[in-house]
Amino acid sequence: MDLSTGQFFVLGINAAQVESQLSRINPKEFIVPDKLIEKPEFFETFRNHRAILTPQPSARFDSQNAIKRLKTLYGVNAMDAFGDFSRAELAAAGALLDYVELTQKGKVPRVAALRRPSAGDLMEIDAATRRNLELVLTISGERRGSLLSIIDQTVTGPGARLLAAYLSSPLTRPDQINARLDAVQYLLNENGLRQDLRAKLKGSGDIARSLSRLSLGRGGPRDLAAIGKGLEIADELANLLADDALLPPLLTKAKEQLGHNRSQIDRLNFALAEDLPLLARDGGFIAENFDPDLDELRGLKSHSRQLIAALQQKYREETNVSTLKIKHNNVLGYFIEISAGQADKIPIEADSTFIHRQTLANAIRFTTVELNELDSKVATAGDKAVTLELEFFELLRQEILDAGEQVATAAEALAVIDLFCSQAELSESRGWCRPIVDDSLELSITAGKHPVVEQAVVQQDEGQPETFIANDCHLNSDARMWLLTGPNMAGKSTFLRQNALIVVLAQIGSYVPATKAHIGVVDRLFSRVGAADDLAKGRSTFMVEMVETAIILNQATERSFVILDEIGRGTATFDGLSIAWATVESLLEVNHSRSLFATHYHELTALAEKQAALSCHTMKIKEWQDQIIFMHEVVDGTADRSYGIHVAKLAGLPSNTVNRANEILEKLEKGDEASTISLLANDLPLFQVQNTAPPPAKIPEHLKTLETALKAVNPDDLSPREALESLYQLRALMAEAD
């Protein structure tokens, strides 16, 4: 449940899926029955998420009580209309609803109809893969630098949230994906319409969150105004989309959801003032002419001086006392005052209008029934006005909540239009293409680019996109795996990740950074890239690598897409090579997954001779004057060297260490590995190399002459003229040396 928008979902899964689903949802709080914590199959999951874990008594998860709570919430006699939910799903939904009532002190937010996303409709991405691919957040936990930060061109908060939700949950049904792509393509072609829509969307606010605040009793007049403004913009967007019969289905649906809110718009426009306070209790948010009684109270409060002055003039005329005054103090309130010498002009009989209040040495004070009533009205007008405004606020709030489903639907449609407009804007500005998405096992990408790295290169090189090298990737049922060799720093990891990101983008219904792409839907995406330990769990870097590899080999299917980088490098050479070899064979023969496998084990290329579904590729380089140039281009073939020592040199290793490494490498390549290593260990020439200082540089003759001349000069013994002459002499020596 998202309290800020009222969305409410339930999904039945098995224990193995809990971690990946939590990674997809990324909740702020995670409640579980206390008895579940004792089960060993959930131990790791609960430990990973203990910061957000909130155990609850198992009694809260009773399915019968849950059904009663849900029926009460939705005001129905049966839950059949919402779907066929299992007992476990109902128990979870009821427990969550009960927890919300508890934490919100009985105030339940506006909750949308309970929905169940079909588990098979979403691509499964485990936590490690999400972390490696940096979809929504980078590995360091920042939004900047993630895929989301690069593709987000939305202009509203709800649109940005929807994009993040799409990116976290790619689809697996081609019809749903292509429906989204149709909407993006339509808005890409209709540039003028798209710009008009985006211009209006910028002022639409966040209707869903304002509605949620109002439902929890935390909202104020500005939330009412935000809803009114948002609904008005929704109405304008519906008019912009109304005339085109070629509107794609998703945009047609959004257009229908946008309208039908005219009564709420007119009501709020008529009721609310232009300048609104943050809190309803501050008053002043109801517009003039909305209610006569409120206008009268405000008139008393704001025009009390004019009313008192008019009454004072009336009494002067009645008594013929020109010096009569109406005054005010905190004891008597408003009162009439005349001088003592004119007291005989004011009758004080029992039936007189004037009532004696006080006699002073120089003045006499009176009051009247009329003045007392005005005094009472003026004194209480402000409080009564605020009280009346609070009543109107509650009335307006309830009217909006009664139309809550309709308002929330319009808010959802605004977010959808913003999202599709932003994707069209992104595609046009970056030159991305529409992918072909179907049920095949094809994964063919022509001139693909890494969207994040490409943007970083463009910014670094002052907008020159040509500096990023695009690469192809072609996999299918007959050619399921590319074995990628080549040096470090040549771009293997970038190539692996860019193809995974292109698959994700295609399956959220986005255009992709390529000139052509054909994606047979991927049911599960797996990534084993990079190295990191997990000391909190007692796992070394190699152990983490093996755990992630095990997950892939146990769960990947022929519809999965797997990217693997440097499997087996964290252990002894022969152990690592054996693990990598067996992993390649398993992916090809057991899992049948489409895979990209990057490695420094050149021995693996021999598998291409017996595995028809495996093809070898390498990162292209050029060698020039004892240097290598990374071309960042993937080509057919294999690498004969890894160039690790060259990368070490680029990293700044001391020259003597680099030279020694080259010497050892040369001996290892020439002789038997075991005997060569033994010889190197016995000789221990490394220390000799490290302790050998470079010979002193030979000083040229002209510099020796200049040095001698400088030593002969004693500045303390020179007169100004002699100092000047010495400078000329030194300058002449420098000229001769040149």
Image: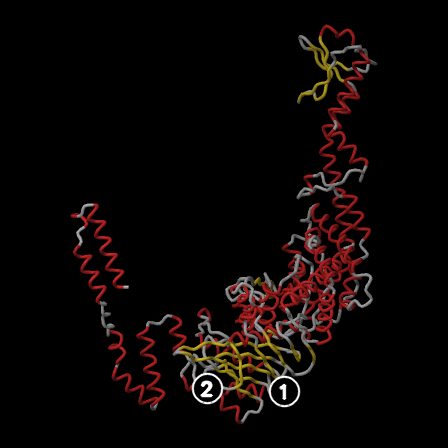
Three-letter amino acid code at disc 2? His
The residue located at (53%, 85%) in the rendering is: 636
- Quarter-wise, where is residue 409 in the image? bottom right
- Height in image: 369 above or below 592? above
Q: Tell me if mark 2 has few (under 14), some (14-19) or many (20+) residues whose alpha carbon lies within 10 angstroms of its own.
A: some
Does the image show residue 69? no
Tell me residue 462's x, y (percent). Answer: 53, 63
- Height in image: 447 above or below 218? below
For disc 1, the marked residue is 477
The residue located at (70%, 41%) in the rendering is: 275
Tell me residue 435's x, y (percent). Answer: 67, 75
Describe residue 134's horizontal placement relative to residue 178 as left or right.
left
SS type, badge 2: helix
The residue located at (64%, 78%) in the rendering is: 523
- Height in image: 300 above or below 281? above
> Which quarter of the rendered picture does the N terminus lie within?
bottom right
* 1 or 2: mark nearer the eye: 2
Three-letter amino acid code at disc 1? Ser
Label drawn at residue 602: 2
> Which quarter of the rendered picture does the C terminus lie within?
bottom left
- The earlier-in-sequence mark between 1 and 2 is 1
- C-alpha gap between disc 1 and disc 2: 24 Å
Pick whichever, 72 or 199, lies toward us. 199
Does the image show residue 367? yes
- Quarter-wise, where is residue 709 in the image? bottom left
Pick whichever, 190 or 685, lies toward us. 190
